[in-house]
Image (cartoon, rainbow, N blue to C red):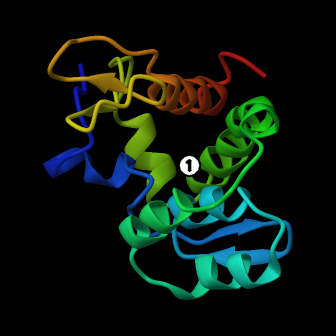
Amino acid sequence: MIKEFKNEYDWLSNFFPCVICLNGRIFPSIEHAFQSEKSSDLDWKKKCQEILSPGKIKRDAKKLEINRKEWDKKKLKIMEICIDQKFSKEPFRTKLLETGEEEIQEGNNWNDEFWGVNLKTGKGSNHLGKLIMKKRDRLNNKIF
């Protein structure tokens, strides 16, 4: 099992540099693209394209006033679009296929039990890990 996106598996992280095109805009990582969708404000979207630190974008996004109900309806689909792009490109495609049948878990210490699994408690839905494994299955022609 891949328990967390560190060391030899850091490339699985949404913070890892990769070009993502979302709604006609180019972003330097999945995190940038994903966070850009939390607001329709063009200045915010531009900031998400220009600030290099995915951590800063994530922190700044927490200050946004968003409609939580609407965001919760669309966030999984947005993440799936980004995951699909990243892992369709090399070297990510080959690296993902090389994980074989291993379970992929986005283990974390920041208490995220939606996208990952809280390593302190072992609890979490692991939606990010599941989306990545779903992409791997599509690459292996196991699902369409």
Q: Is residue 11 above or below residue 1?
A: below
Residue at x-position 72% and y-position 51%: 66
Quarter of the figure with the N terminus: top left
Quarter of the figure with the C terminus: top right
Q: Is residue 137 above or below residue 89?
A: above
Q: Position of residue 74 (x, y in %)?
A: 79, 37
Residue at x-position 71% and y-position 17%: 143
Frontmost residue, 101 versus 2: 2
Q: Say whether residue 53 is left or right of residue 31.
A: left
Q: Amino acid at mark 1?
A: Phe
Residue at x-position 59% and y-position 24%: 134
Q: Give the number of marks.
A: 1
Q: Say whether residue 138 is left or right of residue 53.
A: right
Q: Say whether residue 132 is left or right of residue 121.
A: right
Q: Specify the quadrant of the image occupied by residue 108.
A: top left
Q: Is residue 3 above or below residue 78?
A: above
Frontmost residue, 96 versus 83: 83
Q: Position of residue 30 (x, y in %)?
A: 55, 59
- Residue at disc 1, secondary structure: loop
Q: Say whether residue 10 is left or right of residue 26.
A: left
Q: Neighbour class for label 1 at 10 Å: few (<14), some, many (≥20)?
A: many
Residue at x-position 60% and y-position 45%: 83
Q: Position of residue 35 (x, y in %)?
A: 61, 59
For label 1, the residue is: 87
Q: Specify the quadrant of the image occupied by residue 120.
A: top left
Q: Is residue 45 above or below residue 111?
A: below
